[in-house]
Image (cartoon, coloured by chain):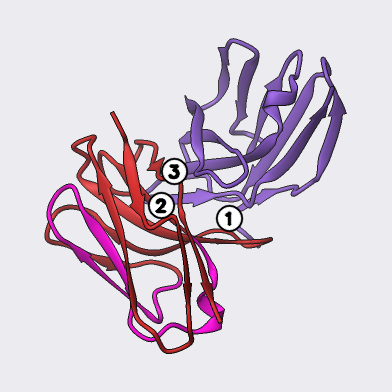
Amino acid sequence: NAGVTQTPKFQVLKTGQSMTLQCAQDMNHNSMYWYRQDPGMGLRLIYYSASEGTTDKGEVPNGYNVSRLNKREFSLRLESAAPSQTSVYFCASSENPMSNQPQHFGDGTRLSIL
Amino acid sequence: QKEVEQDPGPLSVPEGAIVSLNCTYSNSAFQYFMWYRQYSRKGPELLMYTYSSGNKEDGRFTAQVDKSSKYISLFIRDSQPSDSATYLCAMTGGNQFYFGTGTSLTVIP
């Protein structure tokens, strides 16, 4: 039982390049989330998908797009990477959106943009 | 004012000590409270999950919620070097979910 799986684990990009971060969960959860974690800033929500077929902006959506491919998979795309997007990106899932259920996290993608 | 406040530490204690980690919050709609443990280069891992006020114990860990004071705590008894990690509080209610920024803990052998 893998839980939440993120790929890749590490990536280095040049400014202006594009990239898609992949996330898959095997817990049959309805809701999925993308966060970024920066020193001193904690976890900040980028986008979330309450259920298959829906996506909504979080606290810091600028510069990102998402796709809820199916119930299991939720991808995050950087169309034109900027150094300010250097961060650790976490995907999470929960049974229901923003509700009483805890979120379960993957191990992150460490992204550096030069 | 932030929704959730958590002292970032760092906190350094000797092995065997009792550790107290705390968060305060401002939103009275929060009803469910969680503690996550995050090891270096790993994702947050759910440690404790509690509802409303009161205590919950799981082995060496005790989560305490005081809704009247808007204050939650995590106690770690007989701390071990393997407890060295960052601990994040989280809370949800009223269709909102918030994380604290985390407290870094080091347990020295």
Q: Which of the marked residues, 1 or 2, is nearer the chain's N terminus? A: 1
Q: Position of residue A5 (x, y in %)?
A: 33, 45
Circle 2: residue type: Gln
Instruction: Name which quarter of the figure residue A83 lies in.
Output: bottom right
Disc 1 designates what residue? B3
Q: Please give the chain letter of the residue carrying mark 1.
A: B
Residue drawn at x 44%, y 68% as measured from the top left: A59
Any magenta on residue A89?
no
* Labels 1 and 2 touching (C-beta < 8 A): yes
Q: Position of residue B80 (x, y in %)?
A: 74, 19
Q: Is residue A89 left or right of residue A42?
A: left
Q: Residues within 10 Å of mark 2 (few under 14, many from 20)?
A: some
Any magenta on residue A62?
yes
Q: Which chain, by letter, is red?
A: A
Disc 2 designates what residue? B96
Q: Which chain, by letter, is purple?
A: B
Element under label 2?
A: strand
Q: CA distance from mark 2 to mark 3?
A: 5 Å
Q: Do marks 3 and 1 share a subunit? A: yes
Disc 3 designates what residue? B92
Q: CA distance from mark 1 to mark 2?
A: 10 Å
Q: Is residue A80 above or below residue B37?
A: below
Q: Please give the chain letter of the residue carrying mark 3.
A: B
Residue drawn at x 38%, y 66% as measured from the top left: A58
Residue drawn at x 45%, y 46% as measured from the top left: A107
* Labels 3 and 1 touching (C-beta < 8 A): no
Question: Quarter of the image containing the N terminus of chain A?
Answer: top left
Circle 1: residue type: Glu
